[in-house]
């Protein structure tokens, strides 16, 4: 599933299933902490050679190990530790060289001023985990594989603009872009290089043995997998970057969130990665001895997406009134334990492109009523407003079983009724909700968590570009069917500009227009609640990535 | 007898075809599908989803997909998992040992204890023991397993710290003793319910036999009570249990959905739930066929065994 579905399919903090919620009620009270049964950690802090192990608990099982095949975010925890991109991205959003010696920019000549010619110099002496040297041929192979029609590729957008890939030397590669596309740097920062000598030898690349025994250049090597239980990685002593201090990394699959939390308390697992700790356990978790609990902001923004082709939502006055009549503060404080971040935009607040000067929404029923009165929406049968034969009545959908969201829906239903708007709740199982119903814009309105960006790049054409609506034959996820010529123009401009300051001006303006048009009513920016043993050093989230265990080679035991 | 077995196998084949056909159709017609988990990936579009579905062969007519899948069954190709691309048979084989260990231990334990409790309850009908066993069985049967599981973890793992809070083994240990300590809680939880079931069946089966004429005759001839009990009563009372045991085989190998989830046990039950969650059609169909075969074999085996154990029953 996607970032979104961290909020959709039981992936997020706020998503316990009904069974899990029942179970939480049972286990609720704090238990007595026990001494740990795993001696291996006690002497795990050796400085020279990697030693010891760390167990990372996940509530979903990583199963896709070829990073270019369709996968969900939990798989990326494995990818980041086995593979390397040409350059990665730091939590603050700067690109950091990995397999490339330096990050190509216009300033250093890596990218031509028109954004069309790319030249990347590669690190020398890097070896694949099987000992074969890594060269520019591998980079060429990877970029070609992603767009190879025979290959079941998970994402081709961006890579399909690459032309004329030329291997200049084993450590230098050039290519041309079909058009200037600034977000490509961001896309490359999560494009992992895969070995040509292994994959090209496979009879069917979609079913290559590599897919279940990946070989990378990264800080950890694949060791073993017990399907349905855990995956083990071992430190790569020949890594060119920061050498791992912890020898053995275990990704342990624990499907039930309550059990995940229990095993965190008993010490069976050292880290709770996705989906981490549920917010109702936050107070207790904070007080646990020798455990550290952190609230990590993520780029996913929760909103009420409106299907703008529905006659109810065509009038901007209606959208403004609906937004005013949402008691956001109560939803955030009471339902989400105040752990999520209020927001007025789709842009994460940690992004350099975030616009902090947008007007603040204030919960105001009177004002909302006034706007609707002025716009000519008159109360009709049952007190529900109408205008020109259109009743202000619509359905709202989200993933069934997501209890906190369902409560938020009911809360909005009440306050909207106070302005003469009837909202009917029609929730669906995840596989139905996020199928055609969502992609083909068959909903009226939906509560959804979306990461609107392209990685760390502010490009949002996939969501707000008028040509990105699948229901209108477009390619993208503009399921709101939003269409604004000015926004289209700005987004095209923003994607082609290479200069950060110029781009920033563009995206600040996009956010202003979106805030004014309200194709979606922003509710809050998500956070993840994660915990780890306090002796573990180096655990740090990265808002630009989809998974927390992205830098295990910098972790160590105190 | 061989004719009988052949007939039964023939019937079984028809049942298998029907099960697979219905299963396949229902699975594919249900809304949603394997693509929806990728729908909210960044930049995903309907066109891209369609391309991936096309590459996975999901865009072909349903009957074409079914016949391809079905004919491949015969050459031992059960398809590949949508999740990790491994052959379905190895996926199933990978999860079987865990389930076999858990369910096998729990079943053996429950049959032994259940038989004992049932016989004792029947022999000493309405005694304190019988009343306690009856009430206990009712309580055990009416409380959900996950609740038992969580309470057991809370008490024995979190509070007392005697036993591990789930998992099949400690990673890096995996000694026999390690397996054993990890088995105790889930087996106890499963056995609690199963003992209740077995003891109820055994009690009523024993009661059916214990008042019959041949038992009274045996007693009248002066045989010791113990010998009558073991050689006449229990032997006869166990006959219906053979059928019941045959029906249990698919349950043993099918895994325990709830218990495996609560105790993080990587068995068949978890596999089934996960495969459903990700719409992993090949694996779901594989488990469906596997279970159907087990049900049919279990029944056949039970009928044959009853024939062997009880000369009065003639098959054919």
Image: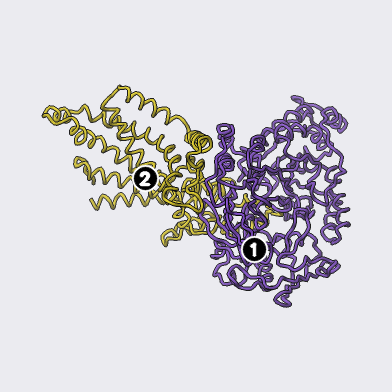
Instruction: State left or right for residue B101 relative to residue B49.
Output: left
Q: Secondary structure at mark 2?
A: helix
Residue lying at the far bottom of the rendered structure: A169
As displayed, is residue A388 above or below residue A526?
Answer: above
Whole-percent x, y for residue A52 in the image: 57, 55
Q: How many marks?
A: 2
**Colour-to-chain, yellow:** B
Whole-percent x, y for residue A57 in the image: 59, 48
Mark identifier at residue B249: 2
Instruction: State left or right for residue B264 relative to residue B217.
Output: right
**Colour-to-chain, purple:** A
As displayed, is residue A381 above or below residue B265?
Answer: above
The way the protein has been coloured in the rendering is: by chain
Q: Chain of mark 2?
A: B
Q: Quadrant of residue B74?
A: bottom left
Q: Is residue B22 visible?
A: no
Residue lying at the far left of the rendered structure: B221
Q: Chain of mark 1?
A: A
Mark identifier at residue A218: 1
């Amino acid at each position: 599933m996607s970032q979104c579905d961290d909020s959709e399919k039981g992936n997020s903090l706020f998503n316990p299933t009904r069974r899990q919620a029942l179970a939480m009620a049972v286990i609720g009270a704090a238990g007595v902490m026990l001494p740990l049964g795993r001696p291996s950690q006690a002497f795990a802090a050796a400085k020279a050679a990697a030693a010891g192990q760390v167990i990372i608990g996940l509530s979903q099982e990583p199963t896709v190990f070829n990073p270019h095949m369709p996968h969900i975010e939990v798989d990326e925890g494995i990818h980041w530790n086995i593979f390397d991109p040409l350059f990665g991205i730091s939590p603050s959003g700067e690109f950091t060289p990995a397999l490339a010696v330096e990050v190509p920019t216009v300033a250093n000549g890596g990218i031509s001023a028109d954004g069309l010619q790319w030249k990347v110099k590669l690190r020398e002496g890097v070896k694949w985990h099987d000992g074969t040297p890594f060269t520019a041929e591998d980079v060429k192979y990877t970029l070609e594989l992603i767009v190879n029609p025979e290959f079941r590729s998970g994402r081709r957008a961006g890579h399909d603009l690459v032309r004329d890939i030329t291997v200049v030397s084993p450590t230098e590669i050039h290519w041309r872009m079909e058009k200037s596309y600034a977000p490509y740097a961001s896309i490359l920062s999560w494009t992992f290089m895969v070995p040509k000598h292994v994959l090209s030898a496979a009879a069917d690349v979609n079913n290559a043995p590599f897919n279940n025994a990946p070989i990378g250049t990264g800080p950890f090597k694949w060791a073993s997998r017990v399907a349905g239980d855990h995956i083990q990685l071992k430190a790569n002593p020949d890594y060119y970057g920061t050498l791992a201090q912890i020898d053995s990394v275990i990704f342990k699959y624990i499907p039930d969130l309550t059990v995940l939390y229990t095993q965190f308390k008993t010490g069976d697992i050292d880290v709770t990665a996705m989906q981490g700790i549920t917010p109702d356990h936050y107070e207790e978790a904070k007080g646990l001895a020798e455990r550290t609990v952190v609230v990590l902001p993520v780029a996913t923004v929760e909103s009420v997406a409106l299907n703008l082709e529905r006659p109810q939502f065509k009038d901007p006055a209606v959208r403004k009134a609906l937004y005013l009549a949402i008691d956001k503060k109560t939803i955030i404080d009471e339902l989400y334990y105040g752990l999520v971040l209020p927001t007025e935009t789709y842009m994460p607040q940690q992004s350099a492109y975030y616009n902090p000067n947008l007007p603040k929404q204030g919960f105001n029923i009177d004002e909302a009523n006034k706007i609707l009165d002025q716009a000519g929406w008159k109360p009709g049968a049952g007190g529900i407003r109408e205008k020109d034969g259109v009743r202000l009545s619509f359905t709202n959908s989200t993933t069934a079983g997501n209890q906190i969201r369902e409560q938020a829906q009911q809360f909005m239903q009440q306050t909207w009724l106070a302005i003469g708007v009837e909202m009917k709740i029609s929730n669906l199982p995840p596989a139905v909700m996020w199928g055609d119903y969502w992609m083909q814009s068959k909903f009226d309105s939906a509560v959804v968590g979306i990461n609107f960006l392209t990685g760390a790049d502010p490009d949002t054409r996939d969501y707000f570009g008028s040509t990105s609506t699948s229901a209108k034959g477009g390619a993208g996820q503009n399921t709101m069917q939003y269409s604004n010529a000015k926004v289209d123009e700005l987004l095209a401009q923003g994607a082609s500009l290479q200069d950060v300051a110029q781009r920033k001006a563009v995206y600040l303006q996009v956010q202003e227009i979106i805030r004014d048009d309200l194709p979606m009513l922003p509710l809050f920016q998500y956070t993840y609640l994660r915990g780890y043993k306090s002796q573990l050093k180096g655990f740090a989230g990265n808002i630009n990535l989809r998974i927390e265990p992205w830098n295990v080679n910098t972790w160590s035991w105190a | 007898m061989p004719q009988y077995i052949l007939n039964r196998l023939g019937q079984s084949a028809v049942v298998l075809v029907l099960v697979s056909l219905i299963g396949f159709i229902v699975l594919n017609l249900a809304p949603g599908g394997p693509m929806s988990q990728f729908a909210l990936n960044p930049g995903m579009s309907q066109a891209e989803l369609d391309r991936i579905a096309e590459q996975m062969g999901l865009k072909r007519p349903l009957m074409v997909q079914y016949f391809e899948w079905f004919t491949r069954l015969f050459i031992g190709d059960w398809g590949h998992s949508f999740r990790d691309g491994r052959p379905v048979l190895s996926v199933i084989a990978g999860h079987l040992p865990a389930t076999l260990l858990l369910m096998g231990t729990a079943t053996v334990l429950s049959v032994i204890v259940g038989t004992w409790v049932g016989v004792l309850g029947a022999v000493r009908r309405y005694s304190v023991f019988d009343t306690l066993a009856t009430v206990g069985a009712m309580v055990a049967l009416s409380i959900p397993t996950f609740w038992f599981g969580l309470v057991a973890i809370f008490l024995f793992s979190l509070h007392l710290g005697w036993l591990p809070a789930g998992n099949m083994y400690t990673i890096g240990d995996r000694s026999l003793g390690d397996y054993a300590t990890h088995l105790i809680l889930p087996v106890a939880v499963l056995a609690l319910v199963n003992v209740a079931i077995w003891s109820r069946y055994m009690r009523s089966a024993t009661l059916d036999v214990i008042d019959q004429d041949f038992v009274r005759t045996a007693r009248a001839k002066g045989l010791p009570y113990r010998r009558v009990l073991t050689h006449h009563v229990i032997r006869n009372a166990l006959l219906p249990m053979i059928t019941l045991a045959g029906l249990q085989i698919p349950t043993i190998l099918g895994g325990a959905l709830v218990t495996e989830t609560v105790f993080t046990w990587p068995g068949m039950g978890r596999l089934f739930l996960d495969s459903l969650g990700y719409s992993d059609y090949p694996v779901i169909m594989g488990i469906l066929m596997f279970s159907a075969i087990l049900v049919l074999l279990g029944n056949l085996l039970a009928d044959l065994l009853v024939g062997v154990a009880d000369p009065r029953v003639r098959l054919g």
